Amino acid sequence: MAGTLIDPNRISPDQEGARAPLYVARPLLPELSDLNALLEGVWATRIVTNEAALHNRLEAELSRLLRVPVAKLFSSGTSALQCAMLALDLPKGSEVITTPLTFPATAHAISACGLTPVFADIEPDTLTIDPRAVEAAITPRTAAVLGVHVYGTICDVDALEALCAAHDLRLLFDAAHAFYSQSGGRSVATMGDVSAFSLHATKLYNTVEGGLATTNDTDLAERLGLARNFGIESEERVSIVGMNGKMSELHAAVGLLNLDGLPAERAARKALRASYNSIVSRHFGLKTQALQVDVVHSEQYYLLRVDPQAFGASRDDLYEALKARKIFARKYFWPICTDYDCYRGMPIISLEKVAVADQVKSTLLCLPFHSGVTDAHVDVIAETIAST
Ligand SMILES: *Cc1c(COP(=O)(O)O)cnc(C)c1O
C-alpha cells in the first residue's frame, strides 16, 4: 500500500515493487497557489458560472491560439458535440455518418440529439474515416458527416469537404485528439462547419472537465451559445431546444493557467514520441501511426500497432506484460462502437469484405504519453517490449 505513495521519479527502475503505477494520461495542472490567486477574484464577485469573466477571457485566448474566429466553451467535449448538432438544426431522425473507431461520446452525441449514427469504415493507414466508405453510406436521410481526427491523425478533410459540398451535407469534426494541430498551415479548428474538442483531464490541454466548439461561421456561433444555455435568448424568450452545457469559472481558471504549461507539455511529449519511435523501429511487427507530412501533431496519444504474426505476440500479450510491470497502456479503441451493447448489429459500411475497423481493432494500443513518463519508465517499456 505504501508503494503507491512514493514519487516514481525517485525510484530506480530495479526497485520495481516500489514504483508507482504509470497511466496512459496524466493531467497538466497549474500551481495550486496560482489557481487560488485567480479564484480570489471570482470569490470576491460571487459570479461563479454562466459565461462570466474568466470564461470569456479563455474563449478569447483560445480563439487566438487556435486561429479561429469563434471558440465557444462547454462543460465537456460531449456537450460541445451535442450542441454543435443542435446548433446545426439537423432534421430529427436523420442520419449522421461517423467512424466506429472512436470514444463512445462521438456516437452517443449523435444518438442523444435524436439522430441515427451510421458507421462508415476507416482507411487502413491513417485509421480515419474513409471518404469512399462515407460516399457509399449516404442515403436520402443523411444530414451530416462527423469525422474524428483519431490519435491526432488528421482526416482526409479535402475529400470530406468536397463530398459534403456535393451532397449538401454538414461536416463536423470530433477534434478531441487534435488540440492545437495544424495541417498544411491550416488550424484544425477551422475545418468543416464546426469542430468539437474535449478539454477533459486526460486530454493534452485540459480544464479538468470541459469542451470547446470552434467555427468560422458567426451565425452558428450564436446558435452554439443558445444550445449550451437551454436555448434561452432573453429573460422572456426561449428559442431552440438546448441544454446546460456551460463551463464554470473554476474550470475556466484552470484553463487560463494551463495555457502557460501547454508548450512545455507538448515539447515533453514530442521528445517522448521520438524515444518511443526508436523503440518501435527496432521491432519487426510494430509500427506507430501514419506520419502525415505538413501536419503539426497535437501530441495527444502515442499509438502502437502490433502485427501479431510479425511481432510474435499479440496486442493483448503486450498489454498484459506491461500491466504486470504496473505500466497501464490502453486498448484504444477496443471495443469499437459497433461492439457496444447499444450499437451491436449495426453494420460498418465498407468497401472491404471484412471492415478495416474490425481487422485492426485488436492490434491497437496507446502507450503512456505525458510529461510524467521518465527515462526509467521508457527503459522498462523497451525491456518489456523486447521480452514479450
Ligand atoms: C475524450 C473524448 C470525447 C469526450 O469528451 P468529454 O470531454 O469526456 O465529454 C469525445 N470524443 C473523443 C474522440 C474523445 O477522445
Image (cartoon, rainbow, N blue to C red):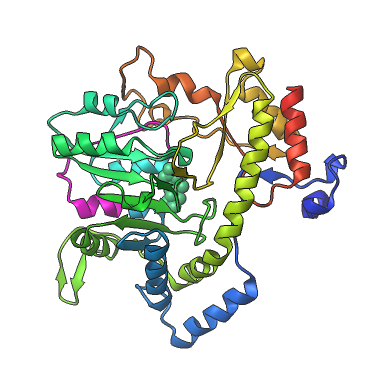
Q: Nearer the viewer, residue 157 or 83?
A: 157
Q: Which residues are magenta?
A: 82-103
Quadrant for the C terminus in the image: top right
**For residue 353, above or below residue 182:** above
Q: How many marks?
A: 0
- Asked if residue 188 is positioned above or below residue 107 in the image, the reply reads below
Q: Identify whether 363 is placed above or below 257.
A: above
Residue drawn at the location 21% of the way across and 68% of the way down: 232
Residue 136 spot, x, y in % from top left? 23, 23
Q: Is residue 312 visible?
A: yes
Quarter of image, res 32: bottom right
**Which residue is outermost to the bottom?**
44
**Residue ID at (44%, 47%):** 178
Instruction: Give me the residue at 76% from left, 44% from top.
Output: 375
* Magenta stretch contains residue 88: yes
Residue 95 in sight here: no
As drawn, is 271 to the left or to the right of 348? Answer: right
Q: Nearer the viewer, residue 21 or 121?
A: 121
Q: Position of residue 290 (x, y in %)?
A: 49, 31
Q: Position of residue 119 (x, y in %)?
A: 31, 29
Residue 376, x across and y down, in percent: 78, 43
**Looking at the image, which residue is at 31% across and 27% down?**
120
